[in-house]
Image (spheres, rainbow, N blue to C red):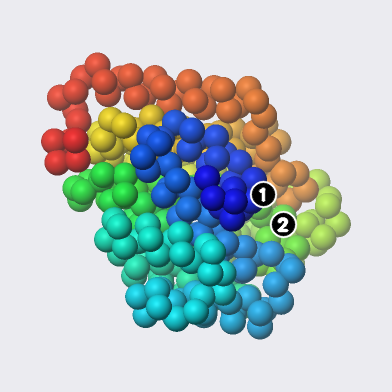
Amino acid sequence: MQETVRKILARHGRSFWLASFFLPVSIRSDITTLYAFFRTLDNFADDPQYPEPIARSLLLSWRTWVLLDFRPPPPDPALATLVASVFQRYHLNPNYTVELIDCLLDDLRPRRLTTFAELLHYCYGVGGTVGLTLAPLLGVRCRRGLEAAKTLGLAMQLTNIARDVGEDLRRHRLYLPQEDLSRFRVSESSLRALATEFAPPPQEVRLLIRLQTERARLLYDRAQHGYTCLPRPVRFGILSAAELYRSILTALERNRFDSLRLRAVTGADDKILAILRAWRLHQSLERDRRKLCPTCL
C-alpha cells in the first residue's frame, strides 16, 4: 500500500483497514486509496487544526480538481495521482465526490437540522455518496445494489452521529434533528451544557441518542437486501466492513447511550463477533445461490 494512504488509514480508518484484508488483492489498494481520499476531505471539515478559511480553501481546491477532470494542481499531488488513476480506470462518477465536498463546505458553518428527513439528506451527502462511488469498483451494477450501497453509507454516517454527539457539541455542531429534541423535551442549551461539563445525561437524552441508534440499525438491515448484489470475491469484505461499523452501536448501548461524555469504542471481542456475523451472512448466500443477483455476479 502506498505510504500516503497507509498513514491516513493508520490514523483514521482502523475498522476499514481490518475489513480491507478480506477484499481481493486486485482491488484492495484502489478501495483503500479512495477511502483515504474521502477521509482526507472529511478531516478538513472536522479537524480543529484546519481553521475555517483554510479548510474552505482546501475543499474548494479539491472540488475544482475533481470538476475539471483532475487537471488543476491539487493540494496533495501524491494522493491526487493515486485517486485520479482509480477514478479513470474504473470510470467512476465524480459528481458524487462534488456532492460530498459541497456537504462538507456547508459543515464549516453552524448546522441546524429540523427533521429526520434533513438528517438523512446530510447522511447521504457525506456517506451515501461514498457508497455510490465505490459500488462500480466493487462490481455492483444493478439498481438494487446501488440503493444498498447508498443505504449502507447512510447507516455508517448515522452511526457516527450517534457516537459523536458530545464531541460535535463541543465543536459547536448538532446533527440531532430539532423535532427529536422536542419529542423528548430536550433543549439544545441543556445538551451543550452537559457536553461542556461532561455531566451524566438524564434519561431523556439517552432516549434521544438511542433513537438514532435504532434508526441506524434499521438502515443496516435495509442495506442487507442488496448484499445479494455483491459479487462473491468482494462480498465477505464488504459484509465485514458493515458489521464492524455496526458493532459501534453495540458499544453505544453498552455505554447506556451516553455519547456526550463517553466514546463508544469496540474491543477485540466486538470485532471478532462482527467478522463472525459477516461470515455467517456470506455463507448463507453461498448456500442459496438462487438469491444472488445475476446482473452483478
Measured from the top left, where is residue 150 in percent x and y?
Answer: 35, 52
Query: Is 235 placed left or right of 110 in the picture?
Result: left
Q: Can residue 208 be seen in this view?
A: no
Task: Residue 1: tell me if it is visible.
Answer: yes
Seen as rendered, the residue at the extreme top is 287
Residue at 56% over, 74% down: 75
Residue drawn at x 67%, y 49% as measured from the top left: 11
Question: Disc 1 designates what residue?
Answer: 11
Q: What residue is drawn where x is 46% and y is 64%?
A: 81
Q: In this view, does 208 lie above or below 95?
A: above
Q: Mark 2 points at which residue?
A: 167
Task: Decide if residue 35 is on the left or right side of residue 185.
Answer: left
Other residues around mark 1 within 10 Å, as few (<14) / some (14–19) / many (≥20)? few
Residue 65, placed above or below residue 280: below
Q: Position of residue 199 (x, y in %)?
A: 83, 50
Residue at 86 percent of width and 57 percent of height: 197
Nearer-the-camera pick, 22 or 269: 22
* Amino acid tagged 1: Arg
Tag nearer the camera, 1 or 2: 1
**Quarter-of-image position of residue 89:** bottom left
Q: Is mark 2 on a helix, strand or loop?
A: helix
Say what amino acid the circle numbered 2 marks. Glu
Q: Is mark 1 on a helix, strand or loop?
A: helix
- Residue 46: quarter of image: bottom right
| Real-space CA distance between mark 1 and mark 2, rounded to the nearest whole angstrom | 18 Å
Instruction: Please give left or right for residue 256 compared with residue 114 in the image.
Output: right
